Each structure stands twice: as structure tokens, then as C-alpha cells.
Amino acid sequence: MKHGANIYKYAKQLGCRSDEIIDFSSNINLYQPQSALHVTNSTIAKYAQSNYTTLKTAIAHNYGLKKSQITLYNGATAAVYALFEALKQKKVTLYAPLYGEYEKAALQSKKNVYKINRIENIDATVAKKSIVVFVNPSTPEGSFYELATLFAYWKKQKCTVILDESFLEFESHPSLRQMIQNYKKLYIVQSFSKFYSCPGVRIGAVFSNKKNTTKLHPPLWNISSLDAAFLQKRLGDKTFREKSRQLHTIQKQELLDILKKCGLFEQIVHSDANFILTQSSQAEEIFSHLLRQKILVRTCGSFDYLDNGWLRFAVKDKQSHTALQNALTTYPGENQ
């Protein structure tokens, strides 16, 4: 499985509707308040602001930035590809495992890719004036890293730093956004779909200093008026962050308890994000068993340094957790 959330593929395989599958492979915020976004002809019959000033103002307010430090794209993945195309350095070091599109984007832009196993060898040497990529909290296990020492080393090496903080907001960890003005070679990739629970709204961003963002040239009107309006409304919800984190804390502990009590996993990795990574010698059988129950989890064989003995479970609501608990309780079941 190269990406999570491929419920359509597995629904076809099972002969069911996609909405019948409980998707633990998709690490999207479980808190999803109803957003009363009223779509009228006037909304869709006119162009969006070409520079998205209103949306950038809302993002700047929420993230402690200036509008000039924000470049918007049609999703964080599009931002990653555009960023690699814009950067001229040829050497790229990926702190792996990480989101697979970083390697694809680097190779597409004809970079030379090197990898560091951040789990076993995080202090490995990095080439001077190269590009380094670090996801924090990480994926697929959700570890949050205190980056002060490592960031000081990257600065000493005069590296261009791409830091992905897309899962940072779930547990209020400190950001390095305040370093944007102090270190001119820092770029922060921000997905809005994860925390703001809107993967159907394709908006991602690169945060950097004004000189850098000026050199990035996203296509004109690359975000729809509807997407911009939805995210503006969600960013303006003053209770969203607090309620999200409260519910996340409760439901994450519930999921952790279920995974521990079932006794099927040899390892359950501590997470600082909204998903939990597990390891089992029976992982492939567990995956198949859950899928027969219309429960989809994320296999991790596509990640560097991992194999399909690792399964990742996203934090979900109580009803989904109950279904998972029941399915794990029946393992191996009569079909095993």
C-alpha cells in the first residue's frame, strides 16, 4: 500500500460501497463539525482572488505569520513538487522513513537523493549546501523530535531545510515557524487537510521568508473559490482547535487501549500524532482479517526501513473503535 485512504480500490475488491469501509488508513482529524458553507451562483460565477489575500490573512493570523511568508498550492503534495522544482541544489537528503512523495518529487526534478535512517542514525553526516527534508512529527510512527541540535547542524552546513509540520497541531508541539526570518534557507510545508479534516479541500502551503516566497510561482487561480471559502470558515472557527485536541486526546487513548488489550502486536510505538504504528508477526493476516470486516488499515511496507509486518491505525471515533475492537477480538476467526 503506497498511500492510505484508497477505500475505492478495496470497496471494489470486497464488492461493497466505499462508504461501508471504516478507513483507519486515513489519518484525518476525527473532529468534523458541520460547516454551513452556503454555495450560491455568485460564489462559483466569479473568479477567486488571484492572490488569495483573505485566505492568507486567515492563515497568517492562525499561524503567527505575515501574508508575504505564505505561498498557497492545490494541496501539500503539489507544494512539495513545486518546491523541489524551484530549488537549484542537486543533493537532497531525506530523513526516512517519510511521506513517499518527497522522494518522487526530488527524483522528478532530477535531484540526487540520499537517505538517512532517522530512527537508527539520525546524527549521520549531511553534505554542505544540500537540501534536507524532515517531517515532524514523523510518519509513519508519529514521533515528535526536538530539533534544536539538528537544526543548528543544518545551519552550520548551510543546508536548505524543508520541514514538514503537517501533523504538528494535534498535540500542540512547538513549531520552527519562528525561525523563518532568522534562517533564510528554511521552508515549512503545511497541509491543511490533516488537522482541519478536509482532504477534499485541496489547499497546502509553503511558509518561508518573503524573498523565498516571491520566487515561488504557483499557477494563477490554482485554488478554487469553494476550497478557499471552506478553509477560511474553518480557520475562523475559534473553538475548532480546542475541541479537536480534547477529542483527539480521549480517542487516541481509547485506540491505544484497544491495540494493547487485543494482544496481537509485539510492538506499539509511542505517537505524537493522530495515528499509532504497530508491529506484528501476523500483520498480513490481521490486515486481511480486518479487511473482510470492512476495516481498512495502513500497511507500511512502502516506507523505507519498514516492511508489511507494520500496520498503522489512525485515531477514529468511538463507533469505529468499537468495530475495530470487535474485529480484533474475533481474530483469527473461522476463516483463518
Image (cartoon, helix red, strand yellow):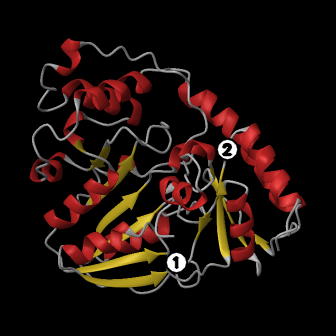
- In the rendered image, residue 110, in percent from the top left (x then y), is placed at 17, 79
How crowded is the residue under tag 2: few (<14 C-alpha within 10 Å), some, or many (20+)?
many
- Which residue is rendered at x = 21% and y = 66% of the image? 84
- In the rendered image, residue 55, in percent from the top left (x then y), is placed at 27, 28
Image-based side of 7 in relation to 260, left or right? left
Image-based side of 335 in relation to 295, left or right? right
- In the rendered image, residue 132, in percent from the top left (x then y), is placed at 34, 72
How crowded is the residue under tag 1: few (<14 C-alpha within 10 Å), some, or many (20+)?
some
Q: Indicate the amino acid at tag 1.
A: Arg
In the rendering, which numbered label is found on residue 316? 2
- In the rendered image, residue 63, in percent from the top left (x then y), is placed at 39, 36
* Number of marks present in the image shown: 2
Q: Is residue 262 visible?
A: yes
- Which of 3/213 is in front? 3
Q: Indicate the amino acid at tag 2.
A: Lys
In the rendering, which numbered label is found on residue 118? 1
- Which residue is rendered at x = 58% and y = 57% of the image? 25
- Which of 206/9 is in front? 9
Q: Is residue 251 above or below residue 260?
A: above
Q: Is residue 126 visible?
A: no
